[in-house]
Image (cartoon, helix red, strand yellow):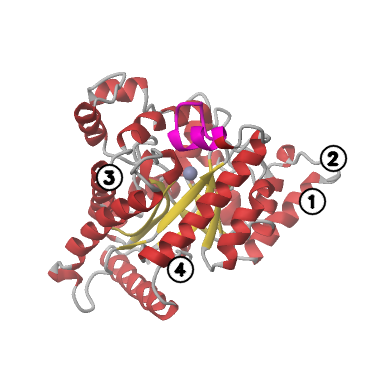
């Protein structure tokens, strides 16, 4: 039997710092929203959708991303956005997750009419705030009880926009800039997203705490998005960057140095010398060792998504072969995340279970992993309040550890 019982994993306070709102709907809700909104699905049964769209393994990242065309189609509606955000928070709370940072690209949902970036973020915030208020009003959260639930929203810019016809906003954006180079259009759209994120935080008081770049990584180096990330950086917004998911070490270096990344999404190929593309790097092994040392020393936190990486990398057959083992050995700051609760069919508890069953993680290493999630969050309140919140999470963790003899 594992030294970490399921009940222990369920009861410890947890975080999820890398979860895509549009990849984390309840499947039953997606089907219900599609029926009501006249959105065509390949099946209206949960089994059918699991067989055809949301699978256990995918051929590549492209197939993994296919399901988003259905979730984005139903989310182009403020009521559905609010419902999806509320249900996501409730599902997280139910498995003991106390702090989340849902992320998504509002640009994929905007319709060039009344569904603006402001309305989209307001709807998501409303759903999350309702779940937070309900949970935090429970008697067991009062005083020095359970750590309260909280959240911050992360706005994603996109590396690529998908097919024409997928996003009305991007189609129009391309239309306006029809004579520009496509890479330049993508760069400009990222700047627009960055400006919107900062403005909405400052004018509407919505807790937009971070900015990210998502989507197919290959062919879209991080450096391309420097202007957008400079803008959010100068406005004291946090940064996280999908890097080293489909592309290697140099992308990670660019994310940290050019985009000022506080955290990295995935970082899966951090240790792979074969993924270093630049001819100027002669000793690739030494390059990745130095980069790993740099990442560790800067305490740039890696958002590790085991199931998701397993599903999108056909070469990765066993969880134990994931580069997470090397991250642990080299003492990098890492936190376990779901990526997409629906598309990857997972939960934070499942990710922790996978980690402790496949890697050598002693009680103090596990505590560090969990506590890093709270410490490295982009918590929306003042720093002193964040410290107090982290302290409550640690105190609760220690109580649960004592209860289950995990010390
Ligand atoms: Zn992601």
Q: Are marks 3 and 4 in contact (CB under 8 Å)?
A: no
Measure the C-alpha gap from mark 3 to mark 4: 32 Å
Residue lying farthest bottom? 384
| Between discs 3 and 4, the one toward the N terminus | 3
Is residue 266 visible in this depiction of the protein? Answer: no
Return the mark for residue 120. Answer: none
Q: Is residue 177 left or right of residue 105?
A: right
**Residue that label 4 marks:** 375
**Residue that label 1 marks:** 286
Please tell me in which quadrant of the rendered image residue 136 appears: bottom left
Measure the C-alpha gap from mark 2 to mark 4: 38 Å
Q: Magenta stretch?
A: 160-175
**Residue that label 2 marks:** 279
Picture coordinates of residue 330, whole percent (x, y) = 63, 58
Is residue 88 visible in this depiction of the protein? Answer: yes
Picture coordinates of residue 149, whole percent (x, y) = 28, 64
Q: Nearer the viewer, mark 1 or mark 4?
A: 4
């Amino acid at each position: 039997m594992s030294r970490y019982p399921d009940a222990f994993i369920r009861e410890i306070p947890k975080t999820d710092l890398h979860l895509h709102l549009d990849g984390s709907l309840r499947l039953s809700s997606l089907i219900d929203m599609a029926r009501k909104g006249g959105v065509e699905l390949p099946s209206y049964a949960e089994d059918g959708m699991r067989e055809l769209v949301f699978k256990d393994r995918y051929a590549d990242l492209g197939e993994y991303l296919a399901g988003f065309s259905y979730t984005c189609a139903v989310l182009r509606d403020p009521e559905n956005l609010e419902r999806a955000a509320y249900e996501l928070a409730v599902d997280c709370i139910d498995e003991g997750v106390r702090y989340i940072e849902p992320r998504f690209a509002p640009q994929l949902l905007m319709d060039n009419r009344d569904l603006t970036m402001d309305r989209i973020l307001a709807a998501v915030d409303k759903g999350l705030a309702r779940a937070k208020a309900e949970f935090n009003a429970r008697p067991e959260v009062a005083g020095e009880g359970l750590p309260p639930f909280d959240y911050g929203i992360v706005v994603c810019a996109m590396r690529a926009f998908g097919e024409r016809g997928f996003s009305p906003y991007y189609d129009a954006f391309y239309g306006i800039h029809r004579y520009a180079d496509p890479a330049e259009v993508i760069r400009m759209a990222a700047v627009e997203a960055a400006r919107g994120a900062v403005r909405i935080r400052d004018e509407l008081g919505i807790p937009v705490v971070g900015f990210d770049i998502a989507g197919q990584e290959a062919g879209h180096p991080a450096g391309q998005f420097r202007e957008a990330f400079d803008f959010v950086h100068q406005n004291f917004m946090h940064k996280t960057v999908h890097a080293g998911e489909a592309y290697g070490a140099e992308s990670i270096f660019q994310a940290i140095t050019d985009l000022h990344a506080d955290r990295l999404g995935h970082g899966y190929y951090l240790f792979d010398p074969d993924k270093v593309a630049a001819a100027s790097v002669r000793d690739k092994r030494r390059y990745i060792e130095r980069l790993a040392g740099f990442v560790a020393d800067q305490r740039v936190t890696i958002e590790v998504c085991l199931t998701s990486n397993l599903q999108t990398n056909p070469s990765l057959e066993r969880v134990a072969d994931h580069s997470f083992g090397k991250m642990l050995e080299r003492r990098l700051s890492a936190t376990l995340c779901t990526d997409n609760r629906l598309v990857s069919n997972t939960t934070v508890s499942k990710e922790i279970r996978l980690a402790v069953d496949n890697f050598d993680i002693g009680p103090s290493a596990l505590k560090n992993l969990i506590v890093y999630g709270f410490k490295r969050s982009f918590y929306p309140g003042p720093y002193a309040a964040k410290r107090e919140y982290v302290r409550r999470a640690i105190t609760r963790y220690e109580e649960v550890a004592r209860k289950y003899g995990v010390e």
